[in-house]
């Protein structure tokens, strides 16, 4: 048996010790929060957007596009990934490299403020019915929408119309006996992808001029302020993927395995 | 000790040779597994209560396995068509699903096949002659693809009663039920005037049979993804008699 050692601290030393412990705790807390604030945000591993073998790589996100009716659209600076069966569209801001928002609609276009989408029998601009059903669309401005619709609702042939948002007045821009596969405006020029329903040849309408296009024009988009056309897997191109730079009326195939949408 | 045990063992062989050898085998195996003196003899001595205990534990283990398995597998079983396929083996499928009287008795398809007013119960995932479909597959899509909207799940009485997405006949007429070339459960109804034909594909289960006469509003199938499909939906097609052919028309022009 040993004697129990009595606490050797007196009131003064005990208070000093308590103060020391409180000081150490305070220093730890300050250091902890400063360190947490200074912890850098995780960096993106992939800073580009590309398609490879029906897979879309958007920064660090991946989407399978092999399953119809999933699709991608672009209205620079926004990239839209659309999943109609889930009624959801994912919107990415390309310059900021962020997923900007998710919208519970199957979008036809998005310009940062306005949405264009199909709801039942007609196409809506935000909450406003345009009185027509568009297969494709492009928000030209807050007062005008380009809409690819059917010449006759029971047949495949398309036409491009311009719709005044306020008056809902329609103006025919281009009427064809063919299928319009893509529509976009890049550097104030309207681009249309056209597939001949009988010969299956493809064309690009650049403004008012028409040029032959060697592949299916699935997506017309802007990258580095230049117009590009992506050809996604199709029965009309032996299920291959390619992309092309449009320089005036010259079409330059890009010799890379991936289809870059943003780099 | 061993010498003293010998007469006893000889008597045991004489009285119960089978039991003796069983005990020896048990003792041998237990001695191999449990390196304790007399373990084998003890187990052989108390083999009946030990066997009872082991069987009880085994039954308890199997019971727990079944209970836990059922708890974990139930969402998978309910979410798949396994139950539907099993129950479909036993007689009539649609006996419990009531007809939707709001369809009336019509020769012209005026309602969407989920019921409800206008398009309120439907979301279209692929439109009539969708250019995207044509480009991807090289053939036309002469129909609309439908999935139920959130309003359907909130308001449909049929869904609330059955917990199934039931598809109704949109016209009165005769049924043609078959599996298409891609394996899709297909139901066609031709009206009695022989002017309209509606077609549904991808059912997980057809509720009508070949040759049945149905009235509009009769449940004809459960939505599924059989055949050439990338997810649960209904392919809804309307054709009209045009000379000797049946020409596909845009169903949206008919749904009121």
Image (cartoon, coloured by chain):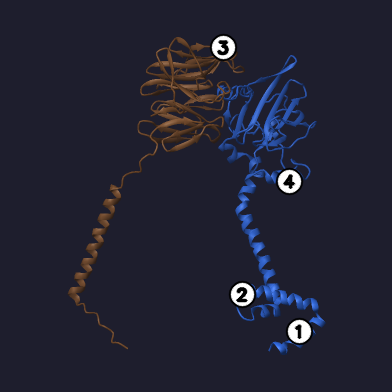
Q: Residue furthest top?
A: A209
> Which residue has dot 2 on it?
B34
Callout 2: few (<14), some (14-19), or many (20+) C-alpha neighbours within 10 Å? Answer: few
Residue B162 picture location, percent across and down: 67, 44
Between disc 1 and disc 2, whose residue precedes?
A: 1
- Chain letter of the residue carrying label 2: B
- The mark lying in front, picked from 4 and 2, is 2
In the displayed structure, A210 sits above or below A113; it is above
Q: Are marks 4 and 2 on the same chain?
A: yes
Asked where in the image residue B140 lies, by quadrant, the reply is top right
Look at the image and tell me whether residue A114 can be seen. Answer: no
In the structure shown, which secondary structural element does the residue marked by tag 3 occupy? loop
> Which residue has dot 3 on it?
A177
Please report the residue visible at 77 percent of the width from the left and 45 percent of the height from the top. Answer: B90
Please report the residue visible at 74 percent of the width from the left and 86 percent of the height from the top. Answer: B6
- The mark lying in front, picked from 1 and 2, is 1
Of B237 and A78, which appears nearest the observer?
Answer: A78
Say whether residue A73 is left or right of residue B206. left
> Which residue has dot 1 on it?
B9
Which chain is rendered brown in the image? Answer: A
> Which residue has dot 4 on it?
B87
In the structure shown, which secondary structural element does the residue marked by tag 2 occupy? loop
Residue B190 picture location, percent across and down: 75, 25
Look at the image and tell me whether residue B205 can be seen. Answer: yes
Kindly check if marks 1 and 2 are in contact, taking CB atoms under 8 A apart as contact.
no
């Amino acid at each position: 048996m040993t004697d129990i050692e009595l606490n050797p601290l007196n009131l003064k030393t005990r208070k000093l010790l308590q103060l020391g412990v409180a000081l150490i705790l305070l220093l730890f807390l300050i250091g902890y929060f400063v360190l947490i604030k200074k912890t850098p945000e995780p960096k993106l591993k992939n800073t580009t957007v590309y398609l490879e073998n029906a897979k879309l790589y958007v920064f660090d996100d991946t989407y399978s596009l092999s399953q119809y009716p999933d699709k991608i659209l672009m209205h620079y600076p926004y990239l839209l990934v659309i999943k109609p069966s889930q009624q959801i569209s994912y919107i990415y801001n390309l310059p900021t490299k962020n997923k900007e928002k998710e919208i519970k609609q199957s979008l036809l276009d998005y310009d940062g403020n306005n949405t264009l989408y199909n709801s039942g029998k007609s196409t809506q601009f935000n909450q406003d019915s345009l009185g027509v059903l568009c297969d494709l669309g492009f928000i030209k401005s807050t007062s005008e929408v380009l809409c690819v619709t059917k010449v006759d609702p029971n047949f495949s042939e398309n036409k491009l119309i311009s719709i005044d948002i306020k008056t809902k007045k329609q103006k025919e821009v281009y009427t064809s006996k063919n299928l319009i596969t893509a529509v976009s405006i890049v550097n104030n020029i309207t681009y249309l992808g056209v597939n001949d329903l009988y010969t299956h040849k493809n064309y690009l309408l650049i403004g008012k001029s028409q040029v032959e296009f060697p592949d299916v024009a699935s997506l017309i988009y802007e990258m580095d302020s230049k117009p590009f056309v992506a050809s996604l897997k199709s029965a009309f191109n032996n299920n291959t993927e390619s992309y092309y730079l449009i320089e005036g009326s010259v079409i330059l195939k890009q010799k890379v395995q991936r289809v870059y949408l943003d780099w | 000790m061993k010498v003293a045990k010998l007469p006893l063992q000889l008597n045991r062989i004489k009285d119960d040779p089978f039991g003796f050898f069983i005990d020896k085998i048990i003792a041998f195996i237990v001695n191999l597994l449990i390196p304790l003196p007399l373990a084998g003899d003890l187990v052989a001595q108390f083999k009946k209560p030990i066997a009872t205990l082991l069987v009880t534990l085994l039954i308890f283990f199997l019971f727990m396995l079944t209970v836990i398995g059922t708890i974990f597998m139930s969402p998978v079983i309910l979410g798949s068509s396994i139950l539907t396929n099993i129950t479909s083996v036993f007689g009539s499928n649609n006996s419990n699903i009531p007809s939707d009287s709001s369809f009336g008795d019509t020769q012209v398809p005026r309602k969407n096949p989920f019921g409800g007013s206008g398009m309120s119960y439907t979301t279209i995932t692929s439109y009539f002659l969708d250019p995207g479909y044509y480009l991807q597959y090289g053939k036309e899509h002469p129909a609309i693809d439908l999935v139920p909207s959130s309003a359907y799940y909130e308001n449909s009485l049929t869904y609330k009663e059955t917990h199934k997405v039931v598809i109704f006949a949109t016209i009165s007429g005769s049924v043609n039920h078959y599996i298409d070339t891609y394996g899709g459960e297909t139901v066609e109804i031709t009206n009695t005037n022989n002017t309209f034909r509606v077609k549904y594909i991808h059912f997980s289960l057809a509720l009508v049979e070949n040759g049945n006469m149905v009235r509009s509003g009769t449940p004809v199938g459960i939505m599924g993804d059989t055949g050439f499909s990338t997810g649960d939906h209904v392919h809804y097609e309307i054709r009209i008699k045009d000379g000797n052919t049946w020409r596909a028309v845009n169903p949206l022009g008919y749904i009121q």
